[in-house]
Image (cartoon, rainbow, N blue to C red):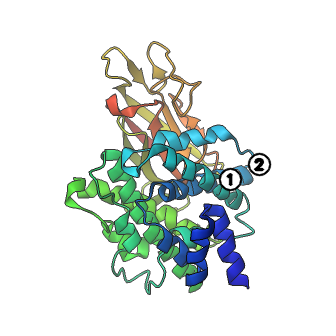
Amino acid sequence: MRRLLQTLSVVSRLGLGTAGLAVALFIGSPAVLVHAQYNSTDSRQHGYEHGYRDGADRGRQDRERGLGRNFRDNDYLAGARDYDPAFGNRSTYMSGYQQGYKAGYDDGYNYYDRPGQYGQLYGRPGDSSSRGGGAASSRGREAAPATRPSAGGYTDAAFDAGYREGVTAGQQDQRQNARSNFRGSQAYKNGDAGYRSSFGDRNAYRQDFQDGFERGYQDGYGRARYSSDGGGYFPNRGTTGAADTRDGEGTTTRTIVVPATRQWTPTSISVHQGDRIRIDTTGEIRWTSNANERARSAGSLDLKKTPGAPMPNAFAGALIGRIDSGQPFGIGDQTSIVAPASGLLYLGVNDDNVSDNSGQFQVVISW
């Protein structure tokens, strides 16, 4: 009976209807239901999975900041900006994104009380080892679209493949009562599961895969427990790779190149709410194809704004940040910021269409 209720809950959240219910009752497992009913190239399911992650991050951060439920319809704009033609039909994708966002926000806001749907949506049933590597997740490999995607599609495929592997590894370590250590996973070290030569640079793919793996590992392991067992980190004594402001060893400075052609660039730096982060930014970008539309870190040199940007009331082209998939915040020419939430730090440019941009910022981050 309990399993049936779990199945009905997943059917309700995904809006699968009677056909989905029939599959669920036949298979008898919510986890298998999601994997059997959809493949990852289904645009609605793809949207649901993206929306769930984004909503869960926003809900968790609102809870950590002591805010009331602050769900707003315009939060869906993030999904519209991140849409790529490789995801399939736009309206179908956005329908799934909105449903996933609502479900994710609710689970994220209550993450201390319940584990969320990460295993059902992203995990790999039947996998036997998180540390031994093993074959890449079949779902992870399917995340690469069959048609030739844009550069944004490649980034998405790498992140999704890594995220699925990370969720699985995190859940396995949690079940084994092992201290969290995403860096110990062979899949994370390799960072190229699901890679195809048509994707281009393997190292660029690896960065996005590892970014997704770390995010997925934290969600699979459980954010509340992950934060209480030492932050999930064994200190990184190197000068590159994943860093945590609480490591206490290794260098405490990273230099990040933020290209104007990418909406969000991962820094691989895990920050914690209340951390003071020092920032030194140089460089100039063009935020349109017009050579006169230039911006430095504070934004457009002629003080223009663009309504569809992540921060529509800030100047176009300005340097901005976010934690995980949370609310974007302005950085501009500030020399330090206080982290508004805990998670992985991303840097980006405040623009609604980055495909026609050029140039880059060089950002030195220290803590």
Q: Quick one: 69 or 187, which is closer to the camera?
A: 69
Q: Give the mark, 1 or 2, whose residue is nearer the N terminus.
A: 1
Whether 183 is drawn above or below 351: the answer is: below
Q: Quick one: 167 or 247, which is closer to the camera?
A: 167
x 53%, y 71%: residue? 34
| Disc 2 secondary structure class | loop
Q: Position of residue 130 (x, y in %)?
A: 44, 80
Kindly indicate the quadrant of the structure image that contains residue 295: top left
Q: Which residue is mark 2?
A: 69
x 35%, y 36%: residue? 261
Q: Which residue is mark 1?
A: 59
Is 242 positioned to the left or the right of 52 in the image?
left
Is 136 positioned to the left or the right of 349 in the image?
left
x 66%, y 48%: residue? 274
Residue type, numbered disc 1? Gly
| Disc 1 secondary structure class | helix
Label 1 close to label 2 by CB (< 8 Å): yes
Query: Alpha-carbon neighbours of circle 2 within 10 Å: few (<14), some, or many (≥20)?
Result: few
Residue type, numbered disc 2? Arg
